[in-house]
Image: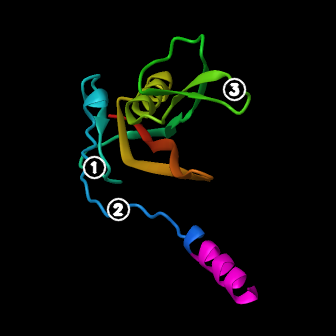
């Protein structure tokens, strides 16, 4: 009897503790600078250019994911869900376009017409549901050509 209970308990724990893993997949991504170039901003990931410029400072554009109250009209790339209090909310994931828009605001504020050494970083957060994109940060040196 003890062997049967032990075997049953062991089998339950062994098979009950299996971890679900993600399937292997590949993909590609294209990040273009159209938002900036269409507004007359020179943009490059290179830290050097072949023309004279005046460095104005480091500028960042950040987009962080987060919840909006259900009464706020923020539907773009939002997922309906419920928070821990049972209130319906909209979660908006970080958006690369939004980060570029914020970067442009900073460039415009200091009078830059270019950005060099452009760098894009993705931040992730571990939750009980897995690893999720939490923020996107774009930085670069603002310049005046």
Q: Which residue is identified by label 2?
A: 23
Tell me which numbered mark, 1 or 2, is placed earlier along the sequence.
2
Q: Viewed as shown, does residue 55 lie left or right of 125?
A: left
On the image, the x and y values in percent for residue 18 come to 53, 70
Mark sitting on residue 49: 1
Q: Secondary structure at mark 2?
A: loop
Dot 3: few (<14), some (14–19), or many (≥20) neighbours within 10 Å?
few
Instruction: Using the numbered discs, state the Cα–Cα distance from disc 1 to disc 2 in whole angstroms.
Output: 42 Å
Q: Magenta part of the protein: which range?
A: 1-14
Q: Secondary structure at mark 1?
A: loop
Q: Residue at x 41, y 49 (%)?
A: 119
Q: Residue furthest bottom?
A: 3
Q: In which quadrant is the C terminus drawn?
A: top left
Q: Which residue is identified by label 3?
A: 86
Which secondary structure type mostly characterizes the magenta part of the structure? helix
Q: Is residue 73 magenta?
A: no
């Amino acid at each position: 009897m003890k062997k049967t209970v032990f075997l049953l308990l062991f089998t339950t724990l062994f098979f009950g503790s299996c971890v679900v893993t993600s399937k292997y997949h590949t993909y590609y991504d294209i990040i273009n600078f159209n938002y900036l170039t269409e507004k007359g901003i020179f943009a490059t990931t290179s830290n050097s250019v072949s023309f004279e410029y005046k460095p104005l400072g480091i500028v960042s554009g950040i987009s962080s994911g987060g919840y909006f109250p259900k009464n706020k009209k923020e539907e773009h790339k939002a997922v309906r869900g419920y928070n821990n209090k049972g209130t319906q909310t909209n979660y908006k994931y970080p958006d690369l376009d939004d980060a570029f828009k914020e970067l442009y605001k900073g460039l415009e504020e200091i009078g830059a017409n270019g950005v060099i050494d452009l760098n894009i970083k993705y931040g992730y957060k571990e939750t009980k549901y897995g690893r999720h994109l939490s923020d996107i940060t774009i930085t670069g040196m603002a310049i005046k050509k």
